[in-house]
Amino acid sequence: MSAIFQDDDDDSVKLYSEDPAWADVVPIPQYQGVDALAPINYTEEYQDATNYFRGIVKTGEMSPRVLQLTEHIIRMNPAHYSAWQYRYRTLLALQSPLEDELRLMDRFAIDYLKTYQVWHHRRLLLVALHSVDAAAAELRFIVRALQDDAKNYHTWSYRQWLLAHFNDEARLWAGERAWTEELLEQDVRNNSAWHHRFFVVWGSGVRKGDEDREEVRKRELGFAKDKIALAPNNPSAWNYLRGVLDHTKTPYSTLSTFVQLYTASSAPAADVFDLDNPPPSAGAELPSVNALEFLADIHEQEGQTEQAVQVCVYVVLRYTFTKHFVAQIWKSLANEHDTMRKKYWEFRIREAMQSR
């Protein structure tokens, strides 16, 4: 195996074409077709390595030196999907210890956190291992990886895939909800943690019948309300609130009292503290754009229900009034509270006025 690509004492690169250990491989240059107007300016080291990679792929070689070659290429270009795939096939052919490969991937995942191929390779390794202990170790590693980037899409996607793949392993799911609470204590606006909480809460015990659905609904609504009270203009918590209501088919109007606390221009007097409807925290910026939008959705949802069961003139008039009331909220958002999305709110107003 040729394991040295650069001398420790100088900056010179040792090429495969200069290494006697690779003399038996016929390198295959990349096909260029015609002269390109803007050719990719590969480094000599990368071009040399990939030439030899194409050479070993053609012969079908799977050996320890192939693992070294693919690692070299991946370090230069972590998005080289073919090198990753051939590396995986070589690992299986050589019956290499996949746990050792995972530990190598720990370094790769931190260095190339935003590269999809790193995480896909880990998936393949976990499928091949099919070990609950390895999966538990992966969950611990992901916690460490997220310390560098708490909202990295690939890392979160991999964690959810891992839990879904080992869906019947209760011990892997056990601490997930508590962990999301820790993350949201650190950053209540961590949308990834909110999304993961929804995945965990409604994708594990409730679905299997291990938890009472109504109790879970109440708990999660209460959790979201408490976080909204801390940061009334945090859309992540409001979206979670909507998600719980939609998932459990609970009418938005059941939260009217709570929402109205956040649509006023100032916080209400705290003479009596309602545990079910926590008020905005001191100094909160009010009214909350998210609360105004939610209030409009409450009335729009009620209006759509009334429209579906129109049986008398009174109901028709009430629906018309509701539609205009909602439009007034949208106008306030467009012209005062949420001018960044002015065009969107104007579209909603036109759409509502044109509907029957």
Image (spheres, helix red, strand yellow):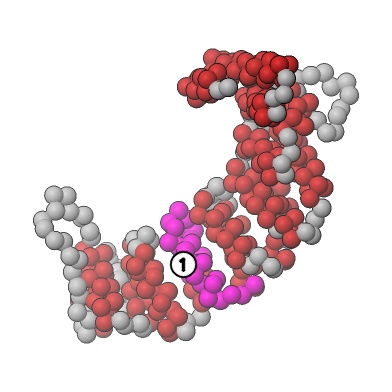
Which residue is disc 1 drawn over? 121
Q: Position of residue 194 (x, y in %)?
A: 64, 45
What residue occupies the far front of the structure in this picture? 311
- Please report the residue visible at 26 percent of the width from the left and 68 percent of the height from the top: 50
Does residue 54 show up? Answer: yes
Percent x, y of residue 254:
77, 32
Front residue of 253/200: it is 253
* Number of numbered labels in the structure image: 1
Q: Going by the picture, which residue comes out furthest to the right?
A: 272
**Does the magenta-highlighted stretch encompass residue 115?**
yes
For the point 26% across and 70% down, the residue is 49
Q: Say which residue appears at 20% left-offset and 66% top-offset.
A: 30
Dot 1 amino acid type: His
Q: Is residue 129 magenta?
A: yes
Side (left or right) of 335 relative to 218: left
Under circle 1, the secondary element is: helix
Asked if residue 346 lies left or right of residue 263, the reply is left
Q: Is residue 302 above or below residue 18?
A: above
48 in relation to 260, above or below:
below
Query: Toward the viewer: 217 or 262?
Result: 217
Q: In which quarter of the image is the C terminus?
A: top right
- Highlighted range, magenta: 104-132
From the top left corner, tell me how far across and down residue 353 is, in percent.
55, 18
Which image quarter: residue 169? Answer: bottom right
Q: In this view, does 57 lie above or below 157?
A: below
Dominant SS of magenta comes to helix
**Percent position (x, y) of residue 2?**
31, 79
